[in-house]
Amino acid sequence: MASKEFNPFEMAQAQFDKVAEILNLEEATRHLLRNPLREYHFSIPVKMDDGTTKVFRGFRVQHNDSRGPCKGGIRFHPQETVDTVRALAMWMTWKCAVVNIPLGGGKGGVICDPHHLSMQEQEHICRGFVRQLAKNVGPLNDVPAPDVMTNAQHMLWMLDEFEAISGAKYPGFITGKPVGMGGSLGRTEATGYGVIFTVREALKELGIRPEDTTAAIQGFGNVAQYAIELYVKLGGKVICVSSWDQGDQCSYTFRRKTGIDLHELLKITDKFGGIDKVKAKELGYEVLDGEAWIEQDVDILLPCALENQVRGDNVNKISKRVKIIAEGANGPTTPEADKVIHERGIFVIPDFLANAGGVTCSYFEQVQCNMNYYWERDEVLSKLDVKMTSAYLAVSELARKRNLYMRDAAYVISVSRVAQACKDRGWV
Ligand code: GLU
């Protein structure tokens, strides 16, 4: 979240400026791409269950649509800020470009805390969000999706509202819908699995067998859970996860050095990914400080929670053994920490490449909706693997050829694709 010390939009702009220099972009292109094309700020009045009315603040930012309709999730978070949404919208543009899908970048957010909202109140927020935006989003200009603390049910309410306003069926308005209601099989798993497809390729490149590796994971939400599932299937061992404790308003790390058991932990986890401390202890987990995940003696670190997690003040806690950091979250590493990681020679799979599986599957969902013909799960996941693997290989080849840091190589590919599209359209 944005704070006085950390502004994710400034960070996204600084990352962009660095690549604009490498690519020697023209001034007008820089100006266009370092800011969103459009943004909407609005209020959502909601009748609460107790009869009072509460007004929530919402945002939708459309960063760039030169390669296709804007695409990106909607987050529900009590500390949401427009600068966080701006950064995330910009990262969506690069994410869609790096996997070469015909979509631009957008993001939405509502300042609210679903922990304290009934399902009915959440439904009102979803419908109110769409009412404020219906004229400015849609299958052909901006397509929302789930993100932090939103899921398939929220998407369905939003779809229903959009269709009621439009007077027709528009399954392509939103992705991440429930399966059977226009959703794609594999969408729930897609982001976490996508992270591990890229980790698998990085391990191949480094000549390391997954069976010989261990990992520490930050987060236990949708991305982390499916990343764990696939990594363990490949033979890896996860020794800890961290999760947010709503009661204590802080996170804890749950460690079991012999390996965590995903299914056992899921049984004691709430729908927001919060693990029950007491029950975890009974199952033999050590309950450590929330930041302990970063200092574990493992081969792979997977930050799969929020932005601003690997910073100047904790980057030096990363163990000498760590060889790969795969960023499942958006923007988990600050530029200060990134510099240290680069200098230490740790192999980074940057966020907008590592976590592009979600939006790639959203794109498959749109394709299936347009055909009104739905693929089997295996077909979706194998297509996802092909897209993620080829995007990874293009980035790592460029990094090797031009001796670039992986993050810079991914940026070079994405930014040049988007800059070219703007130029081809005659915008700059
Ligand atoms: N919210 C996901 C992301 O940050 C997915 C976006 C989408 O499917 O449009 O990549």
Image (tube, rainbow, N blue to C red):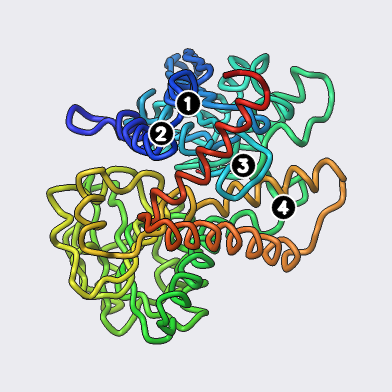
Indicate the amino acid at tag 4: Ser
Vertical placement of residue 23 versus 220, above or below: above
Q: Nearer the viewer, mark 2 or mark 1?
A: 2
**Along the line of sight, the residue nearer the viewer: 413 or 94:** 413
Residue in the picture at 29% in, 46% down: 246
The reply to whether residue 233 is visible in this rendering is yes
Do the residues bearing badges 2 and 1 touch, measured as CB atoms within 8 Å? yes
- Which residue is labeled 2 in the image? 20
- The spot of residue 347 in percent (x, y) is 34, 64
Q: Determine which residue is flagged by label 4.
A: 184
Nearer the observer: mark 3 or 4; the answer is 4
The answer to which of marks 2 and 1 sits earlier in the sequence is: 2
Helix, strand or loop for disc 2: helix
- Quarter containing the N terminus: top left
Label 2 to label 1: alpha-carbon separation: 10 Å
Could you tell whether 426 is left or right of 342 in the image? right
- On the image, the x and y values in percent for residue 288 come to 18, 65
Which residue is labeled 3 in the image? 153
Q: Residue placed at 69% from the left, 67% from the top?
A: 382
Residue 348 or 31: which is nearer the viewer?
A: 31
At horizontal 48% and vertical 18% (from top left) the residue drawn is 28
Give whichever of discs 2 and 4 has the lower sequence position. Answer: 2
